[in-house]
Image (cartoon, rainbow, N blue to C red):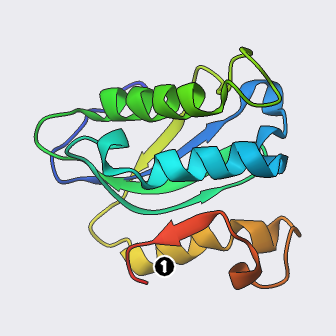
């Protein structure tokens, strides 16, 4: 977590983490599918709730509501570890998957959650990977 931050039960956080050296690990279809299966697995999140997410070739964005048991640093660490275990057998072998750090931002009460979710899932469109978000396969949102 960034300095001065604390993990609050029930708080929604916008999380971003990048791959090691921003390698486009998830350009590989098999690695991306393995990662997506793990992202969609509720066990990856413990008592936190994943609201929406997008897996990009070299990073991941998500909105996560923190539960009562696991603080944000633990949730982020477990997420990165689960994805790493899932994809290490792929084309990149035992190399580290994620950079050590991650970015977090607690959503304020006046932040519109649906607007933030749209921002997250439109990332492939803004990056020029697709012209419509429905053409990009590696995302999900609880509102669907």
Give the percent coordinates (x, y) of residue 101: 57, 24
Image quadrant where residue 107 sits: bottom left
- As drawn, is 32 to the left or to the right of 27? left
Q: Among all residues in the image, which is located at the extreme left?
A: 68
Image quadrant where residue 129 sits: bottom right
Q: Among all residues in the image, which is located at the extreme top?
A: 94
Q: Total of numbered circles in the picture?
A: 1
Q: Residues within 10 Å of mark 1 (few under 14, many from 20)?
A: few
Residue 1 visible in rendering: no
Residue located at (58% from left, 27% from top): 84
- As drawn, is 57 to the left or to the right of 80? right
Q: Among all residues in the image, which is located at the extreme right?
A: 128
Give the percent coordinates (x, y) of residue 54: 60, 60
Residue 11 visible in rendering: yes
In the rendered image of this protein, does residue 62 appear above or below residue 93?
below
Residue located at (55% from left, 35% from top): 83
- The residue under label 1 is 115
Residue located at (51% from left, 31% from top): 80
In the rendered image of this protein, does residue 45 appear above or below residue 51?
above
Give the percent coordinates (x, y) of residue 127: 83, 64
Pick the residue in front: 30 or 125.
30
Pick the residue in front: 29 or 59.
29
Pick the residue in front: 5 or 137.
137
Give the percent coordinates (x, y) of residue 65: 28, 54
In the rendered image of this protein, does residue 131 appear above or below residue 138?
below
Q: Of helix, strand and loop, which one carries label 1?
A: helix
- As drawn, is 117 to the left or to the right of 137? left
- As drawn, is 56 to the left or to the right of 10? right
């Amino acid at each position: 977590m960034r300095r001065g931050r604390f993990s609050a039960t029930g708080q929604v956080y916008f999380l971003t983490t990048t791959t090691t050296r921003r390698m486009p690990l998830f350009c590989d279809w098999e690695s991306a599918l393995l990662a997506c299966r793990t992202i969609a697995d509720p066990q990856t999140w413990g008592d936190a709730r994943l609201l929406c997410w997008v897996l990009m070739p070299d990073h991941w964005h998500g909105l996560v509501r923190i539960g009562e048991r696991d603080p944000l640093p633990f949730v982020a660490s477990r997420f990165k570890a689960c994805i790493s275990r899932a994809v290490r057998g792929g084309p990149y072998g035992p190399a580290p998957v994620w950079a050590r750090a991650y970015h977090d931002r607690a959503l304020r009460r006046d932040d519109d959650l649906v607007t933030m979710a749209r921002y997250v899932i439109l990332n492939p469109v803004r990056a020029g990977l697709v012209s419509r978000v429905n053409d990009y396969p590696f995302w999900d949102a609880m509102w669907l």
